[in-house]
Image (tube, helix red, strand yellow):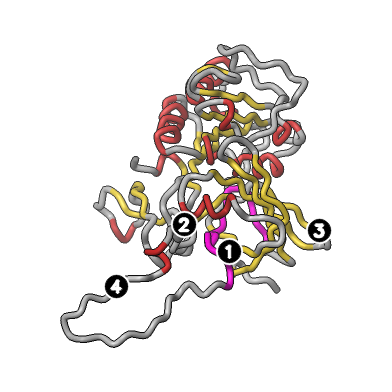
Amino acid sequence: MQKARSQFIAEVLSNRMLCRDHYCLTLQLTCFPATAPGQFIQIACRQWGMDYSVEREFDWRPGQHVEVAGRELIAPLALLRKPFSIADRRDGAGEGGVELDIIHRKVGTGTTWMSTLVAGDKVSLIGPLGNSFPMPGADQVAIMVGGGVGIPPMVYFCRALAGWKAVVFAGTVQRDLIPLTITADTPAPLPDSFQPLYNVNEFSRYGIPAVICTDDGSWGFRGLVTQALEGYLDVCFAKSPDKAIIYTCGPEVMMRRVSQIAESRGIVCHVSVERAMACGMGTCQSCVIKTRNDNPALAGEPFVYKLACKDGPIFDSRNLLW
């Protein structure tokens, strides 16, 4: 029986460029534990199997300066694993294994290396990690709000929400940073409209409409995704906030504003927090997040620290102390 989590070596099936900086990396594994939307994996962003140590011999004399020549100092090298949300999963694909989609943006040493991967390359990963998005109530509308690289987990969540009432709000700075497939024959939405449309393939294939927002108005709603969200909630849920439930992932400033919008209207909001993670399993203690104290053993303390990787990354917004 497969362990709940483990280390795996995956093979790259494809690494497709989605827009200016985003890629969809598809990995194939013979097996992988069950996963749910919101969970993530840790990827070693360096060539698998390579010995990165630099061995050399020299005669050292007291007081002599030793030249540093590690590979990480000679050239850029990602030393730690990096967390990535699962953007989609397909079981029984290809020769009966598991395919995972990872949408990543080229911004640093590790993701630049990932952008160069081609079919047949090997990737070391650990997973699945973290908790997952709770499903909405039977009579609730799931409202997903993603910004930038916070959009990918919403793609996977839509697979689970097929047949439910749901809508996606996706925001980027400009059109060439939208990591989604816009239906070619769909006219551009009006810049002041937050009407959900079936014009994004990744969501419409599950019967879920979307509102695309760009800060500069180059596509869809002109303005912040949080502004479009406010307009939509005020029109559709002003009298029945209990019929909506919000899920958000993206930049912390955006998620904090989404939380404020939800809480001011009495709407439950689940936040997928983002922190730098070295291990993803609660060992390194690097991804602490401040939350309200729910530990009876610490009565009197105003807050407690939890770990984004082990206790999250999904938290009820009402428990977060931003």
Q: Residues within 10 Å of mark 4 (few under 14, many from 20)?
A: few
Q: Judge left or right: residue 199 versus residue 51.
A: right
Res 32 → quadrant: bottom right
Alpha carbons under labels 4 and 3: distance apart: 52 Å
Q: Could you tell me which secondary element the residue under label 4 belongs to?
A: loop
Which is nearer the N-term, disc 4 or disc 3? 4
Camera-nearest label, 1 or 2: 1
Amino acid type, callout 4: Glu
Q: Nearer the viewer, residue 268 or 220?
A: 220
Q: Which residue is mark 4?
A: 67
Q: Is residue 305 magenta?
A: no
Q: Nearer the viewer, residue 197 or 67?
A: 67
CB of mark 4 within 8 Å of CB of mark 1? no
Camera-nearest label, 4 or 1: 4
Give the percent coordinates (x, y) of residue 75: 42, 60
Q: Which residue is mark 3?
A: 92
Amino acid type, callout 1: Leu
Q: Residue at x 46, y 31 (%)?
A: 258
Camera-nearest label, 2 or 4: 4
Q: Which residue is mark 2?
A: 309
Which is nearer the N-term, disc 4 or disc 1? 4
Q: Residue at x 32, y 53 (%)?
A: 304
Alpha carbons under labels 1 and 2: distance apart: 15 Å
Q: Nearer the viewer, residue 299 or 320?
A: 320
